[in-house]
Amino acid sequence: MPMPSHLLPTTVVGSYPQPDWLANRALLTGSVPRTRLHELWRLPAEHLPEAQDDATVVAIRDMERAGIDIVTDGEIRRESYSNRFATALDGVDGDNPAIIVARTGNTKTPVPRVVGPVKRTRPVELHDMQFLRANTDRAAKITLPGPFTMSQQAKNEYYNDEEELAMAFAEAVNAEALELQAAGADVIQLDEPWVRNNPEIAKRYAVKAINRALQGITVPTVVHLCFGYAAVVPGSNKPAGYSFLAELDDTIADQISIEAAQPKLDLGVLKDLSSKKIMLGVLDLSDPEVESVDTVAARIRNGLKYVAADRLVPAPDCGMKYMPRATAFGKLKAMSDAARLVRDELG
């Protein structure tokens, strides 16, 4: 489908609220699953695919009604942004996880163990992309977990070092991305939040892994990073800036997606990304109220002080799946209306 040609095309980071009849959303509060969380789903296995398809149509229609230009499938079939893809690969054992202690030192998180060569032997998100393509005539984006992040969310019991592991994940992501592109993806996004968590390690090989994952992709590509979901990481714990951002100018991705509304990011950092389009978070997902159109328009105008209008893509901050659906819809509509308002001002 054609990409929108107007200035300030709106999009979403990826996720949208899963209906309560489909998922027991209370199980998602407080942590992001790294292994499979089958107990999240309220329906028996034989009815689950149809139910997920139905809920995906609802998410697509909500985005369309809200006026979003580049839609996703809402990631409705996923328990988290990363666990479904990572645990579908050969060499990754999600059934007998390792338990690691979070960096805060108080929560224990089960993570998959890497016990052999990481290989993608079958498509993971291909049906999701085909279903999205069949159910919208808008530009369509699909997201994949980034190779660096997956390497940080697993216990390496096979490779000599973490760089080898990240590069193996990158090959798997690339094979998947090429199939998603062939299935009609207009935009492919890699979610790489862990480059910010471990910037020193990221500086060694994250760009190399990201570039390997995006090799041969000719549609627009995005690298997304965030400070942690508002539902899981309160704003008071969020840093005021990214520790790994300028380095992303060296990736072959066309766009860098950053969360800016909730952490009240100083947008001066965007000058380090002069070669990229910027997908800018202009909806604060820690705020339970739907922002006014004027509030969101002001955030877009603030972005335009640092980024030319033809390089700015308004989006929410990430983690929309944790919100009530009516709130998520209202915020997206406010963003679409705000983008239209600022577009008209730009003439």
Image (cartoon, rainbow, N blue to C red):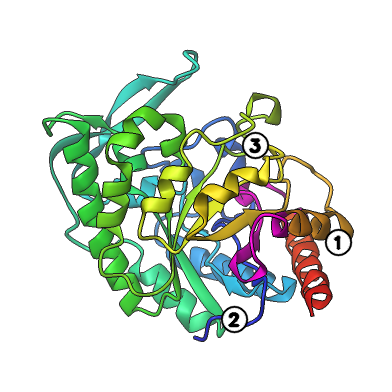
Circle nearer the N terminus (1, 2):
2
View extreme (top): residue:
105
Q: Amino acid at mark 1?
A: Val
Which residue is tagged 2? 4
Report the residue at 71% width, 40% height from top. Answer: 262
Q: Amino acid at mark 2?
A: Pro
Mark 1 to mark 2 CA distance (whole Å): 21 Å
Q: Nearer the viewer, residue 164 or 136?
A: 164
Label 3: how many Cα within 10 Å (few below 14, some 14–19, many 20+)? some
Which residue is tagged 3? 231
Which portion, as a residue range, is magenta?
303-327
Q: Nearer the viewer, residue 215 or 267?
A: 267
Q: Is residue 190 left or right of residue 4?
A: left
Asked if the stretch drawn in magenta spans residue 231, the answer is no
Report the residue at 51% width, 74% height from top. Answer: 140
Report the residue at 26% width, 64% height from top. Answer: 215
Q: Amino acid at mark 3?
A: Ala
Which residue is tagged 1? 293
Mark 3 to mark 2 CA distance (whole Å): 31 Å
Give the image location of residue 295, x and y in percent: 85, 54
Q: Nearer the viewer, residue 240 or 154?
A: 240
Q: Considering only vertical position in the picture, is 8 above or below 192?
A: below
Where residue 308 sits, quadrant-wise, is: bottom right
Q: Any mark on residue 227, and which?
A: none
Q: Is residue 232 left or right of residue 337?
A: left
Asked if the stretch drawn in magenta spans residue 318, the answer is yes
